[in-house]
Image (spheres, rainbow, N blue to C red):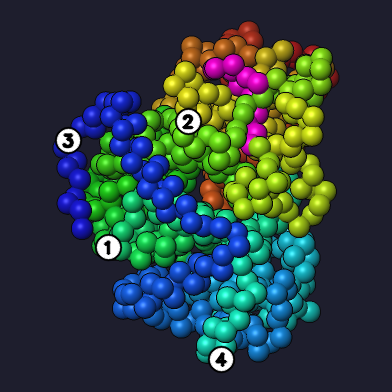
Amino acid sequence: MNAPPDRAAPLAEFDEAAARRRAKKDWLRALERTSNVTSESNRTLARIVDEKARETPEAPALVGEETSLTYRALATRIEEVAGWAEARGLAKGDCVALHMTNSPEYAAIWLGLSRVGVVVALVNTQLRGASLAGVIDACAPKFVVADHEGTIALREAGLDRLETTEPNEIACCIGAAQNVVSSHVTLSDVALLVFTSGTTGLPKAARVSHYRIVMWAEWFAGLMDARAHDRLYNCLPMYHSVGGVVAVGAMLASGGATIVRRAFSARMFWTDIAQSGATLFQYIGELCRYLLARAPDNPPQHNLRLICGNGLRGDVWEAFQTRFAIPRILEFYAATEGTFSLFNVEGKPGAIGRTPPFIAHRSPTAIVRFDIETQAPQRAGDGFCLRCMVGETGEAIGRIDGARQGLSSRFEGYTNAGESERKILRNVFEPGDAWFRTGDLMRQDSQGYYIFVDRIGDTFRWKGENVSTSEIAALVCAIPGVADAAVYGVAAPGADGRAGMVSLVVGDDFDLEVFARVTARDMPAYARPIFLRLCKGLPTTGTFRLQKSELQADGFDPTRITDELFVLESASNGYRNLDAPTYDRIMSGAMRL
């Protein structure tokens, strides 16, 4: 186990040359671990667990709050689940939905079901009512495996017609799957349906093959240099690919252990990190920002050597790393259904990754110019898209290579063919080529690092200028008294584009006059928020991503909103209360924005 980091020692300034030398070793390790992964193989993640169970049967594999599984116990449980599936008559390609909160059993169930060719739909436990019913209808499962909370949610959504099984009922036919897995389940087969977060529309079911699962597992194990003694702390929802597949798979592939927590607890986080002996931690950026804002005076010493995740903003990165003495941060960018990934192996603060020249051919990427008005990539007179220059913002896209089916650049798509087609950009740089649309705006710096700018749809246009919500949110969150912020554009009568609005969660030290002065000083006039809303909390997904659709729907109408509202007044250059008479003046055009 690593020695606890020295909290007194300041972090060294980023050394590009040294970082690239170290990163090359990590890249080569990951390439070596994935070099023999082929789509025709039958070495699924479940089979990898079998191998580890023979090598180190009593080593911990999944460590939960109440129960834990060694590699021997996990392999046995996978056999039980696979046997149950065959006893129930489930055939290759049939779907079973999994509606459970985080636990070691969660991973064992989807590994066991997918082992015999069953496609497992990982259902978001945050969904209720019609949203839950819509997701279930989209995957049409033969069975639903649900824990107690899941069973209640299904009943409340009117899904009593479904045949539901609780995890503790699955225990029969041990070993029945051993004789069939090698003959009819290969890495090219679909293993999971993972639903998108739904932050920009209804959730879509993305197909995830066994090939992608094993590639993810081996690749991340290689980049993190995961070893058998490592323990990775995971409190992210297991119904998403990072918390449920990457965090688990990377450790199973390396013979280490995943510490599975039911949910994130800010109060107990650092104590649990220390007591559990975690050496790795799977993060998302919002979680890190939340921890930094609520940092204890003296957090316990820990044994973390590296944290791995995505979405860590540049303004949070260095403060988080310094405050909690994190030796290394491995930031990455990926989408469950995407054709490429980016990795910031060097640890450059604020970047989401880069692609070394020696692997650029594996999954070609590009950034193309994007028209905010039409919400589509720009095309030149010849009909082809325009590549962005260094420092220019555009949409990131990844080449879809349909001919080489074994590569990760294959687009496996969604269960809905129409949704799949909408993610494909055709005739991009040459006739007949096809590229995956990420829906994300990025730019690339002079050193080749990709910088995330915004989600398409989040960036809005006001007074002829493009406003990036993520960049404004970063500036706003640095203002004293601001604990959290959501920035978005709202329609205003007679105005060109959308006016900027920010919903704030503030502390007792928040000062509206200070807010007005700082935004006037640090932001261009067109980017300054026109409307303010002071909230007790902001709506988020299960992975702490902001859900702005509800806030945008409310707009700035005081008849719909009970929170305090303010509007930027041009005469005073400050904010004043937005009451019903003021709202009427804005809507009638008597008050100009």
- Which residue does the numbered mark 1 point to in the structure image? 229
Q: Quadrant of the C terminus?
A: top right
Give the amino acid at mark 4: Cys
Residue 345's tag is: none
Is 376 situated left or right of 500 in this image? right
Residue 228 picture quarter: bottom left
Gap in angstroms between the C-alphas marked 4 and 2: 51 Å
Q: Earlier in the sequence, mark 2 or mark 1?
A: 1
Is 534 situated left or right of 196 in this image? left
The location of residue 143, given as percent across then percent down, is 70, 78
Question: Residue 29 magenta-drawn?
Answer: no
Please state the total of marks drawn on the protein image. Answer: 4
The location of residue 453, given as percent across then percent down, is 56, 28
Q: Residues within 10 Å of mark 3 (few under 14, many from 20)?
A: few
- Which residue does the numbered mark 3 point to in the structure image? 9
The location of residue 305, given as percent across then percent down, is 27, 48
Q: Nearer the viewer, mark 1 or mark 3?
A: 1
Give the amino acid at mark 2: Pro
Q: Give whichever of 466, 387 is nearer the camera.
A: 387
Q: Which residues are magenta?
A: 387-398
Q: Earlier in the sequence, mark 4 or mark 3?
A: 3
Q: Earlier in the sequence, mark 4 or mark 1?
A: 4
Residue 172's tag is: 4
Give the amino acid at mark 1: His
Residue 357's tag is: 2
Gap in angstroms between the C-alphas marked 4 and 3: 55 Å
Q: Give whichever of 584, 167 is nearer the camera.
A: 167
Q: Are marks 2 and 3 in contact (CB under 8 Å)?
A: no
Q: Nearer the viewer, mark 2 or mark 3?
A: 2
Gap in angstroms between the C-alphas marked 2 and 3: 35 Å
Q: Kindly identify the residue that appears in the image at 28 percent across and 38 percent down.
A: 323
